[in-house]
Image (tube, rainbow, N blue to C red):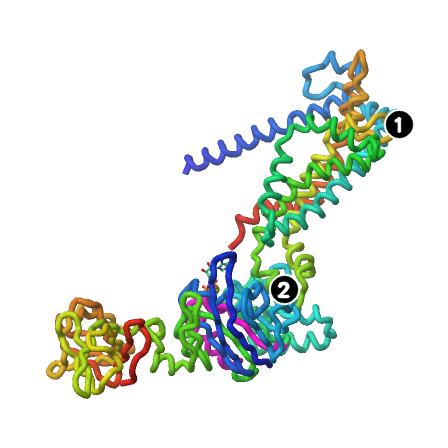
Amino acid sequence: MTGRLLLTIAHRLAILAYIVFALFPLFWLLKVSVTPNDLLYSEGVRLWPSHATLDHYRFVLENSAFPTFFKNSLIVAGSTSVAVTALSSLAGYALSRFRFRGKYALVALMLITQMFPLVMLVAPIFKMLSPLGLTNSLTGLVIVYTAFNVPFATFLMQSFFDGIPKDLEEAAMIDGASRFVAFRQIILPLTLPGIAATLGFVFTAAWSELLFALMLISGNASATFPVGLLTFVSKFSVDFGQMMAAGVMALIPACLFFLLIQRYLVQGLTAGAVKG
Amino acid sequence: MASIALSRVGKSFGTVSVLNEVDLAIEDGEFIVLVGPSGCGKSTLLRMIAGLEEITTGTLTIDGERVNERRPKDRDIAMVFQSYALYPHMSVADNMSYSLRLRRRSKEIIAQAVSAASAKLGLDPYLERRPKALSGGQRQRVAMGRAIVRKPKAFLFDEPLSNLDARLREQMRAEIKRMHGELGATSVYVTHDQIEAMTLASRIVAMNAGAVQQIGAPLDLYDRPANLFVAGFIGSPGMNFLEGRCEQGADTSAVVLPKGFRLPLPLRIPAADGEKVTLGIRPEHVTVDAQQGEIEAAVELVEPTGLGVILHLLVHGEPFKLFSTDRALIRSGARLRIGLPRERLHLFDQAGNRMAAL
Ligand SMILES: Nc1ncnc2c1ncn2[C@@H]1O[C@H](COP(=O)(O)OP(=O)(O)O)[C@@H](O)[C@H]1O
Ligand SMILES: [Mg+2]
C-alpha cells in the first residue's frame, strides 16, 4: 500500500521536475521582460525582480516596428497553415485510399525533399523567386513555407485517414454520395483531430521560421516576427528587456491557437487509446 | 425491386485472379445467399454488384441495363456492412436518414421513413444516440435501418451477423427473413455460415476459390450436392467421405474400400472398373444396428448436443461421424456396428463431381 503511494509520489515528482525544466525558459522570458534595465544585471539571478515594470512592453508596442512584424507573421503563418492543411488533406486522402501509377515514386520523392538541409536551398530559391518579384514579399514566404511543409503534413494526414475505416465512405457512396461528398461529409469531420494537429504543427513551424524569412526579406515592411526580434540586437548591445517583451507577446497567438484546437488535438493523440 | 444478372463476371487484382466467369441471374424478389469459405471471393462479388469494386471482365446488368461503369451512388442499391460502417459523428436518426437527405427529400418524408424503420427495428428509444453508445445488436439494427429507409432496388448484405453472439444472430436471422417476406426486395446475402445460408436463401450460390460450385435451392444443395466441396460444406456436422474403387458386376456395381471391405450397390454406376470413387453419407443418415450393421466402427468421442448425440468414430482407421437423436447412444460402448442406407449415399467420381443418384 505504502509502496504504491510512494510510487505515485515519485511519479508526480518526476512529472513536476520535467514541467519545471520545460517551462523554466518561458518563465525567464517573462521575468526578464518585466525587469527594469537597471536591475537586469544587478539582480541577474533573482527569481523575480524587486520591482517589476511594463515599460518594455509599452516601448515595443509604441516605438518599434513590432506590431508590423506581428501582423506579418500572423498573415504568413495563418495562410501557410491553411494552405498546407488543405493541400495535405487532399493529398493524404489520395495516398491513403487510391492505388495509382507512380504512387511509390511520388512518396519517395516527397521523402527525399525532407532530407536536404534547408541552408543548401536558400540560394536557388532566392534565384527563383527574385525574377518573379516574390522576394521581399509575404506571398513569397507563404509559397516557400507551404512547399516545405506539404510533404510532412501529407504523411501526417495520410496516417489519420488510414485510421478511418474505408467502409465508412463506401457506405456513404452507396447511400448516394459522390466520393467528394463522402470525403467532405463523412471523412473530414472524423479527421478533425488530424486537421487540428496539422494546422498547429504548420502554424508553429511558419511562425518561428527564421532562415528563409531572413534571407528572402529585407527591410521592416514585410519582416516577420523572428526577423524582427533580431532588430533588438544592435552592434554594441542587446536590449534584452524589449526583446523578451516582444517574445512574450509573440507567444500569445500560438497559445491562443493551441487553446482553440486543443480539444481536437487531445482527441487525436488519444484516438488509438479509446477505440473500443 | 430489381433483377440482377451477372454474365461471365471475373475479377483480378493486378495479376491475381480472384473470381472467374461467374454467371448468375437473380430474379426480382429473390433472396440469394453467397456462401463459401473465407477468402473465396464472396465479398468481392458483392462489392462488384454494389459498384465498390471494378468489374475486370464480363457484364453486370440491373433490370436489363448494363451498369458495369455506373457509380455506386447511381445504382440505387443498399448495403449492410460486416463492420456496420455507421457514421460515428451522426445520431442514429441521422445515420438512417443520410441517404434521403442526400436525395433532398422533404423533412416530412424523411421523418416518416425514419420513424417507420425505427419502429420496425425497435430503435425508437435510441434515435438521438450516437453509434458508440449502442450495443453490437443495436448497431446492427441501425445498419439495417439505414438500408431499408430508402426503399432501394436491392439489398446487399456482407456477413451482417458475424459480429453478434449466437443468440442474437439467431434472432436477427429470423428478423431478416421476416423483413424480406414483408418487403419482398431482391437481396444478395454473403455469409460463410452454411446454417444462415440454408435458413435464409431462396437460392444458395456455393462458392469456392473464386468459382461458383453450385446454384440451387437450399434443400437441393443438401440433397444433391454437385461435388465434394458442396457436399462437405453444406450440413453440420459435415458429410462423411469414404474413398474406394468401383467394382462393376453384371447389373450392379460395388465399392471396395481400402481395407477390402466390399459395399454392394443396388444399381450400376457410370464408372470404369477399378476407377476411384468417393462415397458420401451425412452423419444423420448413418444407422446404428448391433446385429445387422455392416461396418464395425470404434467410438472415439461422444458429444451430446441436447437434441441428440454426435459420435466420432473410426471406420477402417478413417474418421467418421454419426448423428442420432437416440440418447441411448451416449452410453454406447467402445465399438458398434453401423449401416449405410443405400438411398442416402452420395457418389462422386474421380474429379469429385456428383455421379449417380442412388
Ligand atoms: N483490394 C484487394 N487487393 C488484392 N487482393 C484482394 C483485395 N481484396 C480482396 N482480395 C483477395 O481476393 C480474395 C477474395 O477476397 P474476399 O472477396 O474478401 O473473400 P471472402 O469475402 O469470400 O472472404 C482473397 O484472396 C483476398 O485476399
Ligand atoms: Mg468477406
The residue pinned by badge 2 equals A172
Can the viewer see residue A75? yes
Q: Is residue B50 left or right of residue B98?
A: left
Within the magenta stretch, is there residue A28? no
Q: Is residue A245 left or right of residue A7?
A: right
Q: Position of residue B146 (x, y in %)?
A: 60, 71
Chain ID, mark 2: A
Spatial separation of the CA atoms under disc 2 and disc 1: 56 Å
Give me the residue at 71% from left, 71% from top: B103
Of the image marks 2 and 1, the number of the one nearer the N terminus:
1
Quadrant in which the C terminus of chain B appears: bottom left
Choose top left, top right, bottom left or bottom right for residue A53. Answer: top right
- Mark 2 against mark 1, which lies toward the viewer? 2
Q: Which residues are magenta?
A: B151-180
Q: Nearer the viewer, residue A178 or B302?
A: A178
Q: Is residue B10 left or right of residue A146?
A: left
The residue pinned by badge 1 equals A62
Choose top left, top right, bottom left or bottom right for residue B139. Answer: bottom right
Q: Is residue A204 left or right of residue B179?
A: right
Q: Position of residue B307 (x, y in %)?
A: 29, 78
Within the magenta stretch, is there residue B154? yes
Give me the residue at 82% from left, 34% from top: A134
Q: Residues within 10 Å of mark 1 (few under 14, many from 20)?
A: few
